[in-house]
Image (spheres, rainbow, N blue to C red):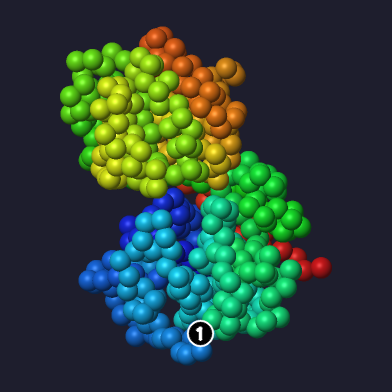
Amino acid sequence: MRVLFLSSEIFPYAKTGGLGDVAYSLPRALEALGVEVLRAMPLYHSLYGQGFEDTGKEVTVRLNGRPYTFRIFRQDRHYFFHQPELYDRPYLYGPPGRAYPDNDLRFGGFCWAVAQAVKEGFFDVDLVHANDWQTALYPVLHHEIFRFPQKVVFTIHNLAFQGMFEKETLERLELPWSLYHIEALEFWGKINLMKGGIIFSDAVTTVSRTYAREILTYEYAYGLEGVLYHHRHKLVGILNGIDYELWNPAQDPHLYVRYSVEDPAPKEENKQAMLRELGVAEFFAEKPLFCFINRFSQQKGVEILLSALERLSRINGFFIFLGEGEYAPLFENIDRRYPNMYARIIFNEGWSHKVYAASDFILVPSLFEPCGITQLIAMRYGTLVVARKTGGLADTLVDVSYPGGYGFLFPDPTPEDLLCGVKRAAELFQYPRYFMRLRRKVMKLDFSWNRSAREYLKLYRQLLFRRKP
């Protein structure tokens, strides 16, 4: 089986969030099961000079009334579509807090170029797997314009971002006006590319079972609940995983001290080293260490955190906040206001590994969370999770109040509920034998990509070998 995997970002070439991680890890896990996976993404300016092989292949598509030529480069099974006018920019999607105004052309053009490459026989595959709004036009082109025989899977990683543009985008993308209706791309007088991906794919997946149920409701669907409910027969929730080679405290070069589930004791040395680095070991060496490692955004529950800061400062523990985003300025110099808190605004991958390893607990107060990998990484590193019960957090955590439980879940996105979860965690920390038992338990949990890849392979086979009526 050969699969073409489309994504706007693939780690380590380009990454702004979890999509890049998935586009790296899932194909690798599928290949371990015998699937040949070809990856395709735009060739951004940041990738220049990496020595990619020029395939000599060019495809030309018409956008906004004129031709655009894409040249295809490759490295191993990764294919990069080079179009300097569209991708020679300092950012993937736009400056912080803003989007490039021609993102419809940038990513719609990528989809057109991939479809043209499939038409010309450059990609000879059995199935195409598109991801999020940036590649959502591909299923539309595949089934409505080119009418290819291959099956298409479309994965929703975050329904909050849908690729919404003015209706004139139809003309800019050289699409027929016959697609401008309620059962295609039209959405309240605009164009919704995510909607097109849902309607015209053979199967739609999202990244946890609970999120697959949640997005059928008004609260979580951002206006697409009716479309998703109509197409619920092809909606499947498959939980994301994490790469256990990349996230491995026994081999992680970033840690102060490495450790493993067989010998988790050195994790404490990471905590003490972190506290010494921050100059607070004298005061908090015996206290619980909490962390928040995520985007400082509304989705991640940062408004809840900010509302709870004064009360959190009265908890007998230390708090580290690591991330970047629109709320970052509100965390600057937080240690001057609260002596038991520290924030690092500029995200650093290596330092995030250190914080995962050093912390006793991690806070994940998300308003919604399609899957989330923060909690999976934390548990891999023996860090217990305090999280809101939603989406993938609900699927990967069991509250300690239940038999076999190992996390701290709170139901509502309020400062009061978050504070209750943190207090429960701090109280449990006072029972070291029980706490250490839970640490070992979460380190043994299997949230690797192996299980998820088997579910995707099962779905692929069902599509490819489904009997026609």
Residue reaching furthest to the bottom? 66
Q: Nearer the viewer, residue 413 or 206?
A: 413
Residue 136 drawn above or below residue 112:
above
Please tell me how crowded label 1 is: few (under 14), some (14-19), or many (20+) other residues with Cα within 10 Å: some
Q: Residue at x 54, y 81 (%)?
A: 172
Is residue 364 toward the left or the right of residue 402 in the image?
left
Choose between 123 and 137: the one closer to the eye: 137
Residue hosting label 1? 64
Q: Residue at x 22, y 71 (%)?
A: 49
- Residue at (43, 32) in percent of width and height: 306
Q: Is residue 198 above or below residue 73?
A: above
Q: Position of residue 80 (x, y in %)?
A: 38, 72
Give the secondary structure at mark 1. loop
Identity of the residue drawn at 34% across and 18% down: 317
User: Height in image: 240 above or below 75?
Assistant: above
Foreground residue among 190 and 458: 190
Residue 302: % across, % down: 45, 37
